[in-house]
Amino acid sequence: MSVVGNNRVGIPIVLLHDAEGAVVTVELKSGEHVRGLLFEAEDQMNIYLKHAVISNPNFPGGKRRKVDQVYIRGSQIVFITIPDMLRHAPMFQR
């Protein structure tokens, strides 16, 4: 039996929805890292973060800026680091 969500989305998207309400780190194609509270995730991997810190490790001095909220288009995401606690998510018990 495969593990899919309501709209026949795959495991990564189900896991991303399970991470809502947790602090995640996102690396973008531009090289920037965004860390914040995952408020909402969409099936296309668009994400909405609150209380985020945006940093650019490629910039001299590693400049950081804080934003109240940020919406990131899924096509700009390289990877998302989610909390370790999701290792015990219900979808992995199947």
Image: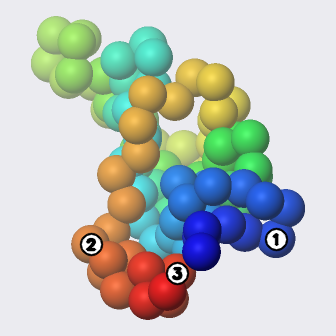
CA distance separating discs 2 and 3 = 15 Å
Q: Residue at x 49, y 86 (%)?
A: 94
Would you say 4 lies left or right of 37 here?
right
User: Is 86 located above or below residue 59 in the figure?
Assistant: below
Q: Amino acid at mark 3?
A: Met
The answer to whether residue 71 shows anywhere in this view is no
User: Is 73 located above or below residue 88 in the figure?
Assistant: above
CA distance separating discs 2 and 1 = 24 Å
The answer to whether residue 70 shows anywhere in this view is yes
Which circle, 2 or 1, is nearer the viewer?
1
Q: Could you say which disc has been placed on residue 6 in the image? A: 1
* Residue 33 on image: x %, y %: 36, 33
Earlier sequence position, callout 2 versus callout 1 = 1
Residue at the disc numbered 2:
84
Residue placed furthest toward the front: 1
* Residue 34 on image: x %, y %: 42, 40
Task: Verify CB contact (< 8 Å) between mark 2 and mark 1.
Answer: no
Q: Could you say which disc has been placed on residue 91 in the image? A: 3
Q: For the residue labelled by badge 1, is the local secondary structure a helix, a strand or a loop? A: loop
Residue 64, by quadrant, is top left
User: Could you say which is closer to the camera, residue 29 or residue 33?
Assistant: 29
Which circle, 2 or 3, is nearer the viewer?
3
Earlier sequence position, callout 2 versus callout 3 = 2
Q: Residue at x 66, y 43 (%)?
A: 45
Would you say 67 lies left or right of 62 here?
right
